[in-house]
Structure formats: C-alpha cells, structure tokens
Image: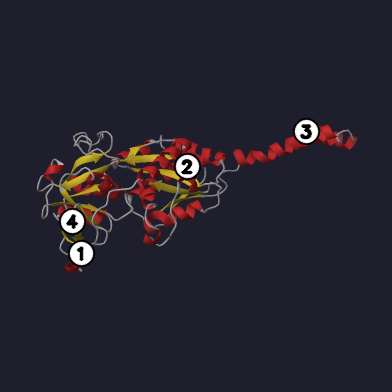
C-alpha cells in the first residue's frame, strides 16, 4: 500500500482491519532497520587508534591507509596515537569503545605477543583476546630478518661471533615478536647461547653494530638505514619462503633452523559487538584502499607487502596467531633482568655481558 493510499483509506475508515494494520507494522519495522544496514554510516569522523607512539612502522602504515579510507567512507579518518604498555592501553580503549564502527584499532603482531605477558608486567592488567575484537581486515605483512653485523662477515648461523663460547642474541624486551622468534630459534641451535633484552630495537641494533651482540631479529623497516649503508646484513629470513625484495637471503628453514616463527603483520579491528553490517562496510572500504597505487607504492618502498584478507579470514588468522604464541616457549637459566643462557646452571650477568655460574651474586 502506497503511503497516500494509506492516508486516504484511513480517512474512509477502511484501513483499520487487523490484516492491514499487520502489513503496515511489517513495513514500518523494515524501514527502521534500513539505516542500520546501509544509510547513515559513518555518521561522524572515524578514529583510527594506533597503540604505539608516533614515528614507528605502525604509525606510518596507519597514516598511509587513513586518507584512502576517508575517501571511500566519505568521512574523515583521524589517526590517534595511544601508546603505552606494549600497545595494550590503546587496544583496551578500542575493545571498550562504543560498538558503532567509529573507532578502529591498528592491530599488529606485537599486541598478540604482548598479551602473553604476566598481568603485573605492564601498567594495565588488560590482555587482548581474540573474542574482544571484531575484525575488519588485514593491511600488510613483513617477515622478521635475522640480522648480523657486516664485520666480521657472517653468512651462516655457525659463523656468528661468540663471547666466552656463547652466541649472544638481542631482543627488544619480553612480549615482543622478536622474543618469540628468539625462543623458537634457540631450540634449534647447537651452540651455547645467551638471550639479552633491550629497551627497544634501536639500542639492540646499535649494540649489534658495535659488536656487543651477535644477531637480532628485526623487520627490514626497523633496520633499513643500516642495511642500506651496508653496516648490517640479513643472514636469514623467518618466513616460509624467500622474499622477492631479498631473493638472495635464505629462510631459516633452508639454514636448518625450521620453527614456528611469526611475521610482523597489520590489520584493522573494532569493538567485538560492532554489527556485522558496519564491519562489512569498513572491510569493503579497506579492500578498495589497498588497491590504491599510492598505498601499494608506499608500503612496498619500505619492504612491507600489501596483504588483503576480509574480516572472516582475518579473524581466523588472528586466532591462529594467538594459539601460536600461547604455546610454551623454551626458556632456561635466568637472572640479569630476563636474559637467558642455554646452560641451566648459569645466569646472565648484565654488567659483564656474559653467562656466569649461579647464583651470580658478584654481578649486582
């Protein structure tokens, strides 16, 4: 019944039968549902939360993608940095945001590994779990490289320099993808090893160049400057296959050190109760954004590979990543603020940069 016919019929008194009222009710209910599934979204600017400080790879990727998302959603997408507690503060804020699709999270591998930290290890006890988010889609991925100093030249893991018979591996703190990969690698090493934590990849890479440590897991992005200058070089890539950008660098599997390594990846997520219709709208916009030549060029220039998975497939992938990092990792020794040694009878001395017999009482 057309609305004019309805009004005319009402005036004649012929519309008020139960059957006709039922039809009208169904029609009105359908109209009420329409804005929720299509029109009206987004109704205001969208906030894209980067859970890390400005200047890092996550921040750069968000600022590459945001303008394209703005164009396709016809609303401004504003990048907001909410760093702290290994990214968990920003992740928590998005998980508790209104589930209306107007707050996005730049999700990355680091948030998955950080969620395995003890609850007292960060300023917030919040730990991310797969069911706390709704998944929009993936953006990009890049493998971790095992990087060594150019001098002395190292072309294989057996050539890594040693200090007092130990291969010293650096990593940027607990709860990081680099630490996960160090744990996986050390289970395959025949040599004695020591794993040393640093406050970030920058200091670890500086000590690598100066010869204090033998190797470090890093993405190309984080070590790009020194790799381009030839001060450091990649001796293996922690992925299933060689990378097109680094065709001469073998995988760790080829080097005889196969394992369950993880890569650095990025994607978008929202609060868990966000309606599927809104997630699909965001996912479609992201898919179109990743087809942009501008976005693809910017990502590839930094050795980051554009990677597009829809919401459902990305959700399955992320759940698998949580399972991967949740598996018990090999950790022996102790002391020295989290450093480990391959020999259970020893602990790492931060001051002397070496493994010593326990209890390391002369290393305070």
Label 4 element class:
helix
**Distance Cα–Cα, label 2 vs label 1:** 47 Å
Task: Name the mark on residue 23.
Answer: 3
Mark closer to the observer (4, 1): 1
Quadrant in the picture for the N terminus: top right
**Distance Cα–Cα, label 4 vs label 1:** 26 Å
**Distance Cα–Cα, label 3 vs label 2:** 37 Å
Q: Position of residue 97 (x, y in %)?
A: 52, 53
Among numbered discs 2 and 1, the one appearing first in the sequence: 2
Give the class, few, some or many, for how many residues have Cα within 10 Å of label 3's Cα (few <14, many ≥20).
Answer: few
Q: Disc 3 vs disc 1: Cβ atoms closer than 8 Å?
A: no
Q: In the image shown, does 177 or 266 lie closer to the viewer? A: 177
Quadrant in the picture for the C terminus: bottom left
Which residue corresponds to mark 1? 359
Among numbered discs 3 and 1, the one appearing first in the sequence: 3
Mark closer to the observer (3, 1): 1
**Distance Cα–Cα, label 2 vs label 4:** 38 Å
Q: How many marks?
A: 4
Label 2 element class:
strand
Q: In the image shown, does 246 or 3 lie closer to the viewer? A: 246
Give the class, few, some or many, for how many residues have Cα within 10 Å of label 2's Cα (few <14, many ≥20).
Answer: many
Residue at horizontal 22 percent and vertical 46 percent from the top? 186
Q: Position of residue 292 (x, y in %)?
A: 40, 36
Task: Tell me if I can see residue 38 in this picture.
Answer: no
Q: Is residue 19 left or right of residue 132?
A: right
Among numbered discs 4 and 3, the one appearing first in the sequence: 3
Which residue corresponds to mark 4? 207
Label 3 element class:
helix
**Distance Cα–Cα, label 4 vs label 3:** 75 Å
Among numbered discs 4 and 1, the one appearing first in the sequence: 4
């Amino acid at each position: 019944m057309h609305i004019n016919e309805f009004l005319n019929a009402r005036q004649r008194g012929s519309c008020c039968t139960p059957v006709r009222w039922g039809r009208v009710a169904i029609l009105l209910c359908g109209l009420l549902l329409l804005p929720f599934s299509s029109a009206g979204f987004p109704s205001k600017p969208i906030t894209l939360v980067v859970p890390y400080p400005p200047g890092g790879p996550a921040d750069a990727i968000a600022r590459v993608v945001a303008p394209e998302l703005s164009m396709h959603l016809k609303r401004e997408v504003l990048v907001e940095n909410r760093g702290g507690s290994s990214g968990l503060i920003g992740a928590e804020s998005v998980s508790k945001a209104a589930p209306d699709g107007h707050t996005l999270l730049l999700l990355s591998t680091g948030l998955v590994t950080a969620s395995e930290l003890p609850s007292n290890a960060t300023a917030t006890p919040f730990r991310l779990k797969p069911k706390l988010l709704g998944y929009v889609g993936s953006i990009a991925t890049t493998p971790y490289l095992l990087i060594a100093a150019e001098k002395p030249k190292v072309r294989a893991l057996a050539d890594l320099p040693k200090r007092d018979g130990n291969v010293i591996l650096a990593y940027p703190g607990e709860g990081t993808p680099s630490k996960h990969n160090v744990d996986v690698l050390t289970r395959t090493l025949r040599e004695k090893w020591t794993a040393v934590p640093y406050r970030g990849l920058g200091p670890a890479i500086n000590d690598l160049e100066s010869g204090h440590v033998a190797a470090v897991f890093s993405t190309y992005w984080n070590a790009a400057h020194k790799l381009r200058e030839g001060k450091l070089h990649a001796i293996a890539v922690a992925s299933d296959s060689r990378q097109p950008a680094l065709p001469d660098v073998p995988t760790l599997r080829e080097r005889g050190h196969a394992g369950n390594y993880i890569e650095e990846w990025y994607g978008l997520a929202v609060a868990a109760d966000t309606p599927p219709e809104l997630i699909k709208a965001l996912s479609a916009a992201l898919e179109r954004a990743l087809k942009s030549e501008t976005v693809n060029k910017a990502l590839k220039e930094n050795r980051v590979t554009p990677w597009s998975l829809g919401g459902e497939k990305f959700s399955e992938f992320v759940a698998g990543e949580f399972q991967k990092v949740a598996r018990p990792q090999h950790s022996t020794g102790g002391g020295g603020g989290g450093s480990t040694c391959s020999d259970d009878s020893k602990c790492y001395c931060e001051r002397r940069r070496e493994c010593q017999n326990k209890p390391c009482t002369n290393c305070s």
